[in-house]
Image: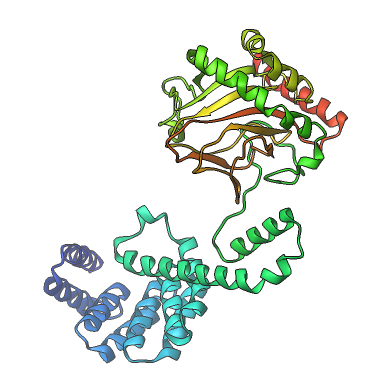
Amino acid sequence: MQQNIEALVQAALRAVQHGQVAQAVSLWRQVRQLRPDHPLALHHLGMEALHRGATIEAIELLQQAHRAAPGEPMTLVSLAMALRERADSDGEARALTQALSLDPYCLPALLAKAALIEREAGPRAAASHYRNALQVAPPERAWPPQLRTALAHAKHCVDRASDALSEFLEARLGVAREKLSPSEAERWREAGALLAGRSQPYPSKPNRLLVPRLPAEPFFERAQFAWVSALERRTAEIREELNAVHAEAQAEFQPYVAYEPGTPVNQWKELNHSTRWSSYFLWQHGAPVEDHLRACPRTAEALAEVEMADIGGLCPNAMFSALAPHTHIPPHHGETNARLVVHLPLIVPEHCLYRVGFEQRRWKVGEVLIFDDSIEHEARNDSDELRVVLIFDVWNPLLSLAERDMVREISAALPEFERG
């Protein structure tokens, strides 16, 4: 008899899959004739009754299915649907609570619970529950077809609540934020965005060496570096040298991104081997580019007054970085948080933007930006003109001199190990 039951079950499931409702119902009823308490047959017959509006019959069948298979959360989700049709909110809530006690990650149950709270208490109260469901759900491109509408509604509800909370916090905290320094105010703007679900944390995630326990500070204060003012005073003469080499030796501006064929770097597909983002190196991976330094003596002199980071095989680096019109450098991470990256803007049209972590800034000619490039960062030139900055790297000032030596040693140790 068991073989007969299994054959009928498989036939019924195939009928369901092909949308043959009447045939599926007939097969499920045959299953029940052989085994009245078969949980799958009871569940499917209960849902069929619900779809044709026989709510009381559906509830009875689904309750029987639950008694036959008390550990199956989806039966309880279906029962909750039937109870909702009877306007039995208390019963619906009990069924969903029981389903989630069996499986706290049951996506249909999480969505149904959020929908119940939305009906009872409004969308703001439901937003955190919808957010929980979205955290459990797969990426949007892989949403199950039968849940796509519910998940889209969940996302809409969460987005609206996030926008409303963000606006509320902006107004509510405005007076208190006036007492903060600019860097403190930016930190609390980010805190509000995180609380509202409008942003995400941006930790240091270097490609190479992470020095632990260093704060993930996107931008550093100019006052921490004694050389800033002297460098900025030389902006005009540095820009003059840039203009000269760009006019006379434009071929020396090489693509900054130059991965070998076959390298898995999808994010750089548009810029790999492209002069849309090009560089004229003065120092590269710790070695001077002598011809370029001779061509730019005043820039070389200005850099000599800066204590650039020196990590074997990595830095110092110094270059004129040219970003073509309407070019986007996608979000990426640098090599280590032991060093910081400096931008001295030289040619900056309108509609250019730089982001490090949460914080967005605009380049201003002659005003240095110092940032931790181990934090996700990106750049945009949405203008019709070229943007050029002088880029170089310096030590993270939070490292002691002894720790700088450790950075050099650990950076040298890895290639030694790899060489065997």
Q: Is residue 347 left or right of residue 77?
A: right
User: At which x and y percent is residue 186?
Assistant: 67, 56
- Provide residue 222's location: percent of width, then percent of height: 76, 41
Q: Does residue 420 appear in the picture of this structure? A: no
Query: Please, is residue 294 above or below residue 283 in the view?
Result: above
Q: How is the image coloured?
A: rainbow
Kindly identify the residue that appears in the image at 57 percent across and 41 percent down: 377
Of the 4 image quadrants, the one containing the N terminus is bottom left
The foreground one among 61 and 124 is 124
Horizontally, is 35 left or right of 383 in the view?
left
Is residue 289 rendered to the left or right of residue 132? right
Q: Nearer the viewer, residue 119 or 98?
A: 119
In this view, 208 is above or below 112? above
- Front position in the image: 155 or 134: 155
Residue 319 percent across, percent down from the top left: 61, 22
State the residue at coordinates (63%, 42%). Answer: 375
Q: Quadrant of residue 95?
A: bottom left
Q: Quadrant of the C terminus?
A: top right
Residue in the foreground of this view, choosing between 133 and 275: 275
Q: Residue at x 34, y 79 (%)?
A: 65
Is residue 332 visible in the rendered image? The answer is yes
Task: Measuring from the top left, give residue 316's x and y in whole percent.
Answer: 70, 22
